[in-house]
Image (cartoon, rainbow, N blue to C red):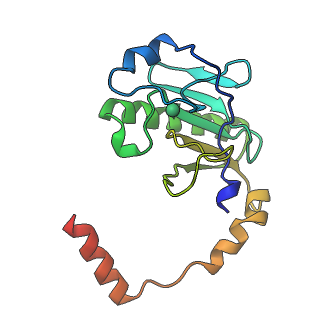
Amino acid sequence: MDSKIATLQIHACGTMIPAELSRKAKTSPMVQDCPFCSIDEQKTAIVEKREAVYVALSNPRLVRGHLLVIPRRHVEKLAELTQEELTVLWDTVVEFQEKILTSFSTGCDVRQNYRPFQRQSRVKVDHLHVHLIPREFKDQIYQVTQIYETQLFEDLEEEEKRDVLLLLRMR
Ligand SMILES: [Zn+2]
């Protein structure tokens, strides 16, 4: 199922560094070969550019209207974002989810994956990003993948509940 998680495909475009990125470079350098650090605006459908984040059409995409919200600074997990970046990121996610619900679909998934065990590829980019995926009742995503998710759900047993709560509360 992992291979179905789409991410933006952009080809690295050499050394052009947008002003906003170079300002951040002291604390978080652009990562070479990161498609989200080096955006090729000829090949990438940018929906909106903001100081701390940008929004782009996912390519490859899962469904029509599949968007990515991407912080400009290269980080790989949510805890690495500053409070300000986190606020801008989620405000943008909320705003564009509403746009999707107005223009594309009756539902919309919000997904953020952290999978350091998976190698970067066309459908897996390490640079943190949030997926906004338009959804409908029994749509293609459901038919191809989520229909099988019901097999994964199990009742939460008392022993597991105790153990997991203990682990989480100890940290
Ligand atoms: Zn990056």
* Residue positioned most to the top: 19
Q: Quadrant of the C terminus?
A: bottom left
Percent position (x, y) of residue 52?
Answer: 44, 24
Q: Residue at x 53, y 83 (%)?
A: 154
Above or below — where is 75 with respect to 55? Answer: below
- Determine the residue located farthest toward the left in the rendered image: 170
Write the residue at 31% across / 35% down: 83
Say which residue appears at 69% left-offset and 56% top-offset.
3
Residue 36's image quarter? Answer: top right
Residue that appears at 58% across and 51% down: 119
Residue 55 vs residue 158: left or right?
Answer: right
Q: As rendered, which of 52 and 108 lies closer to the eye?
A: 52
- The image quadrant where one finds the N terminus is bottom right
Taking 109 as reference, is 103 above or below it? above
Residue 164 higher or lower than 2, as above or below: below
Q: Position of residue 79 (x, y in %)?
A: 34, 45
Left or right: 53 in relation to 145:
left
Question: How far across and how far down the image is residue 111, in percent?
Answer: 55, 50
Q: How many marks?
A: 0
In the displayed structure, 143 sits above or below 58; it is: below
Q: Position of residue 54 (x, y in %)?
A: 55, 26
Horizontally, is 82 left or right of 122 in the view? left
